[in-house]
Image: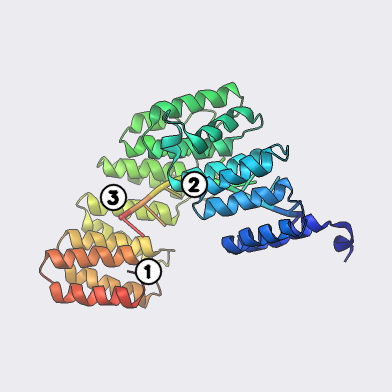
Amino acid sequence: MLCLIHTTPIVESNKILDSFAKMMQYPTAVSLSHRLELKGIVPSLVTLNILINCFCRMGQITFGFSVLRPKILKRSYEPDTITLNTLIKGFCLKGRVKKALTRILTGDTRALVQLLGKIDDSNAVMYSRIIDCLCKHKLLKEVTNFLNEMVLKTINPSVYTYNILVDALCKKGKLKEAKSMITKNMVPNMVTCNSLIDCLCKLGRISYVWDLIHEMHDSGKPANGIRLDVYTLNILLDGLCKGKRLKIAQGVFQDLLVKGYCINVYTYTIMINGLCKQGLLDEALAMLSKMEGNGCIPNAFTFEILICALFEKDGNDKAEKLLREMIARGLL
DNA sequence: TTAGGGTTAG
């Protein structure tokens, strides 16, 4: 009650708008904000940031900018880190960072980059998000530029930033360079180890993987929080399957089931893929039944792998049956 | 706590 006495109409309106946004009812939040404005409730920067977030979540980054220019700047509000972070997320969601940062700067993209230069209190989250997008678009030169910019602004890269870089290097098979990222300034965590394990598996260096996994497992729960998780197990199983070590993968998988480890739809799908690649389609179909029996629901990816394998092996009837099953489950 | 936060697996 006391809270209600001390709040203002705009704060109450923002709470309602944010509730709709949290429930992913973005169009409702947008139309409500228009109606509130028509009723004379002047939007605050918080209102406009919520609106930008709604547009970005709907993939309508241009409308996000239409809030920035005529509403934020014309009201002489100062866009803050939340405004910018939200817009950057919108760009990353739309996959437009590549276009934004390859000197094809037009309209919205130009406005975003200009804004980046103006904001003094930009942070590691912002830069990490951009660096991640750049890595995924293989724009490594721009990554270096952004890292240099972080240094100039005395923003310390976090473990998230380093993990993005480690993973990008690992995915290119550059294990040595990835390891060189781990310095006294960077305390690796299990995400770092998972990226390294994935790389080691893909390079066929399984014995090193076992050493690293034993090191993680034996360390229990040390201060840096490194321990085996479902990501590690899935990366390992996938690496074994793809490295022609299906029997070992099956043994590890069975062991995980017996010991009651937490496994998920990825784990089963990896095993199904491994079995399919070896032409063991009956075993793969049995695995599908097993996962459902264990309460793990297959997704579109799981079905896709099985259906492709069945079509390739002339199992058209079974493939069509699974296709119908997919449709019935609303996965197509 | 009226708004935004980043990394790893099929």
Q: Is the residue at mark 2 from the same chain as the one at mark 3?
A: yes
| Viewer-proximal residue among A199 and A125 | A125
Chain on which label 2 sits: A
Q: Quadrant of the C terminus of chain A?
A: bottom left
Amino acid residing under circle 3:
Gly
Sequence-first tag of 2 and 3: 2
At horizontal 15% and vertical 76% (from top left) the residue drawn is A317
Amino acid residing under circle 1:
Val
**At which x and y percent is residue A41?**
77, 55
Q: Relative to residue A69, is residue A308 drawn left or right?
A: left
Quarter of the rendering containing residue A118: top right
| Viewer-proximal residue among A239 and A106 | A106
**At which x and y percent is residue A325?**
29, 77
Residue annotated with mark 1: A258
User: Does residue A97 appear in the picture of this structure?
Assistant: yes
Structural distance between the alpha carbons of marks 3 and 1? 21 Å
> Tag 3's secondary structure?
helix
Structural distance between the alpha carbons of marks 1 and 2? 23 Å
At horizontal 49% and vertical 52% (from top left) the residue drawn is A59
Residue annotated with mark 2: A219
Count residues near mark 2 (Cα–Cα under 10 Å), then give few for <14, some for 14-19, many for 20+: some
Amino acid residing under circle 2:
Ser
> Tag 1's secondary structure?
helix
**At which x and y percent is residue A161?**
51, 36
Residue A239's tag is: 3
Q: How is the image coloured?
A: rainbow
